[in-house]
Image (cartoon, grey):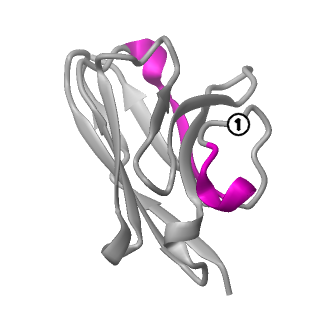
Amino acid sequence: QVQLVESGGGLVQPGGTLRLSCAASGIIFNTYAMNWYRQAPGKQRELVAGITRIGGTKYADSVKGRFTISRDNPKNTVYLQMNSLNPEDTAVYYCNADPALTGMIAGRERPGGCWGQGTQVTVSS
């Protein structure tokens, strides 16, 4: 059974940091690109960051220089380090595992594969 479990969300003040984790099971992790998407209330889901199976990365312009995506293949886990958070980052963050081209395409607009249940990130003073 394929499962993606996100953790690390919460409430943080503007300028603060959070680290999200997504643990995968039931897939051959190192054949998937791993992505983070987010959806704010009343808005469409959007890409935050993606990483190919060999570490190539892609970021949304709004998070470049603030967020870093990384993966630990032996641990079947992908991370999203989020720094300098602002209220516009408030959203539910979803982990995605995309098998396209054996994990060599990150951050597709309409990814395939499987999704986690999401974790809430709220940036507020």
Q: Nearer the viewer, residue 40 or 112?
A: 112
Residue drawn at 40 percent across, 48 percent down:
55
Label 1: element kind: loop
Q: Which residues are magenta?
A: 87-105
Relative to 80, 39 lies left or right: right
| 74 versus 40 height, above or below | below
Residue drawn at 24 percent across, 26 percent down:
83
Residue drawn at 33 percent across, 28 percent down:
67
Q: Nearer the viewer, residue 99 or 42?
A: 99
For label 1, the residue is 108
Residue 92 among those drawn in magenta? yes
- Quadrant location of the C terminus in the rendered image: top left
| 5 versus 104 height, above or below | below
Q: In the rendered image, is residue 35 in sight?
A: yes
Residue type pointed to by label 1: Arg
Q: In the rendered image, is residue 115 in sight?
A: no
Relative to 53, 87 lies left or right: left
| 82 versus 15 height, above or below | below
Q: Position of residue 84 (x, y in %)?
A: 24, 18
- Residue 114, quarter of picture: bottom right
Q: Position of residue 14 (x, y in %)?
A: 26, 16
Please give the count of numbered marks on the rendered protein: 1
